[in-house]
Image (cartoon, rainbow, N blue to C red):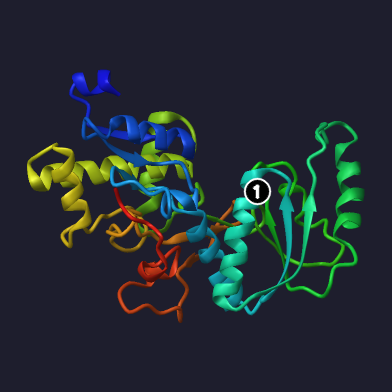
Amino acid sequence: MAELARQGIALIVADLPADDLLKAAEAGKADRILFFNAAATDDRLRQKDCRANIVHTAPSRAMLADGLAQYLVWKKWVRWFLVVGSHERDKLFAAALTRAANRFGAKIVQQREFKDTGGARRTDSGVVQIQQQMPVFTQEAPSYDVLVVADESEVFANNLPYRTWDPRPVAGSAGLVPTSWDASNSLWGGIQMQDRFIAQFKRLMTALDMQAWTAVRMIGEAASRQNSADPKTILDFLKGPELALGAFKGQKLTLRDWDLQLRQPILLTDGRTIVSVSPQQGFLHQFSELDTLGYDRPETQCKLQ
């Protein structure tokens, strides 16, 4: 970090896991380096492990889970069968989904763990194996409206749609997926954004790409409006009432001053189209409906330092 500071670099867009991001933020504190977290969704980075020099453009797991839960409750799919992977990040997403269920009035009728035993199912006989395995794994569950899956490790979730014992929709890590961005998004001028990205990089734009672009957009907006690249000046502007960021999401985005999380809608996609966008109609808030997603000010454990 000291070498970056000597080069005059004081604003960094980071694609780092939570622990590495915290180490970098601590190392850069003395040099007043401001980080923009474009990747890590960990709720603890917005709660007890928040830092005054980390701005979050990536949504938190709580925001993603809340966005999904609002739609499922709006659909009156309130009885959830929760299937959780065996890796730590799967369990963290499951915790966010459980919180969202409690928050919005859904009920988890049963939770099961899918253990990752290794091996490759995507072989010549893999489809047959999966077709036999998934119905057996999901049978004898209590009556439920939707199977909600937490599999951030991408081990098994994509094998669940159309293969459950009971004919039910799948949501979470497969089926209906909450995200900050998807290549299928053509709303609010998003198609122009997608086309420009494809023209330059010869591939589809991912959520991580959008989160990084948003960070750079925030820096550019603050620097041009304040005529300064000073990190404190940038951050003070971003936390203030003048920020109204356009990001192809249907409304202007602002920053929560209590945990430095960017307020933003959550897209719900099946991979081919945008099914819905949260916050859903009817989920009200005294300040911003976007604050129905994730940890609101009264719930925060964040003490910026």
Residue 196 vs residue 156, the one in the foreground: 156
Name the residue: 25% across, 55% down.
Answer: 245
Amino acid, disc 1: Asp
What x and y, as percent, mark residue 75? 61, 77
Q: Dot 1 corresponds to which residue?
A: 90
Residue 145 vs residue 16, the one in the foreground: 16
User: As displayed, is residue 295 above or below residue 230?
Assistant: below
Which of the image's four quarters has the N terminus?
A: top left
Name the residue: 82% across, 37% down.
Answer: 117
Residue 49 vs residue 36, the one in the foreground: 49
Q: Is residue 256 left or right of residue 149?
A: left
| Residue 101: quadrant of the picture | bottom right
Name the residue: 37% across, 31% down.
Answer: 24
What x and y, as percent, mark residue 219? 22, 42
What x and y, as percent, mark residue 212? 37, 40
Q: Is residue 216 left or right of residue 271?
A: left
Name the residue: 12% across, 43% down.
Answer: 224
Label tally: 1
| Residue 253: quadrant of the picture | bottom left
Q: Is residue 176 left or right of residue 136?
A: left
| Residue 14: quadrant of the picture | top left
User: As displayed, is residue 40 above or below residue 109?
Assistant: above
Secondary structure at badge 1 equals: helix
Q: Is residue 266 left or right of residue 288?
A: right
Please indicate, yes or no, whether residue 93 appears anywhere in the rendered image: yes
